[in-house]
Image (cartoon, rainbow, N blue to C red):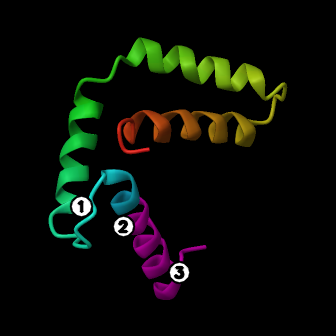
Amino acid sequence: MPLSSVELDQRRADMMLALYRNSGRTCGTYTGLWQEFARDVASSLRDADWSDMRAKCADAIRATNSHLAEDHAEACIAVLRAELVRGWE
């Protein structure tokens, strides 16, 4: 089920707040913050060590002690999110 416009707006606002908090900025402005984040994420993705990420996903899947695809997918998504926001956490 798709998110409502209110839910989507809230997620976007929460993301921008998290980015601001983790950016090291103290000026109170969000100008250029999304672009800076997008550039860094693109660089991280471009330079990713896919064999290392695959190993991390395999470790995360093994840690679920489950044969359920949803658990495995959730574990992989957590690894990918961590990799994509490396340096912004």
- SS at mark 3 in the image: helix
Residue type, numbered disc 2 = Met
* Residue indicated by mark 1: 34
| Disc nearer the start of the sequence (3/1) | 3
Residue sitting nearer the eye, 69 or 55: 55
Residue of label 3: 7
Residue shown at 24%/61% (left/top)?
34
The residues colored magenta run: 1-18
Disc 3 residue type (three-letter): Glu
How packed mark 1 is, by other alpha carbons closer than 10 Å (few <14, some 14-19, many 20 or more), is some
Q: Residues within 10 Å of mark 3 (few under 14, many from 20)?
A: few
In contact (CB < 8 Å): disc 2 and disc 1: yes
The residues tagged by marks 3 and 1 sit, at their Cα atoms, a distance apart of 19 Å
Q: What residue is drawn where x is 22% and y is 72%?
A: 29
Q: Nearer the viewer, mark 2 or mark 3?
A: 2
Amino acid, disc 1: Trp
Left/right of residue 35 with respect to residue 64 in the rendered view? left
Residue appearing at x 25%, y 51% in the figure: 37
Task: Give residue 78's position: percent from left, percent from top.
Answer: 57, 39
- The residue beneath circle 2 is 16
Q: Nearer the viewer, mark 3 or mark 1?
A: 1
Which corner quadrant holds the C terminus?
top left
Secondary structure under tag 1 reads: helix
Q: Position of residue 5 (x, y in %)?
A: 46, 86
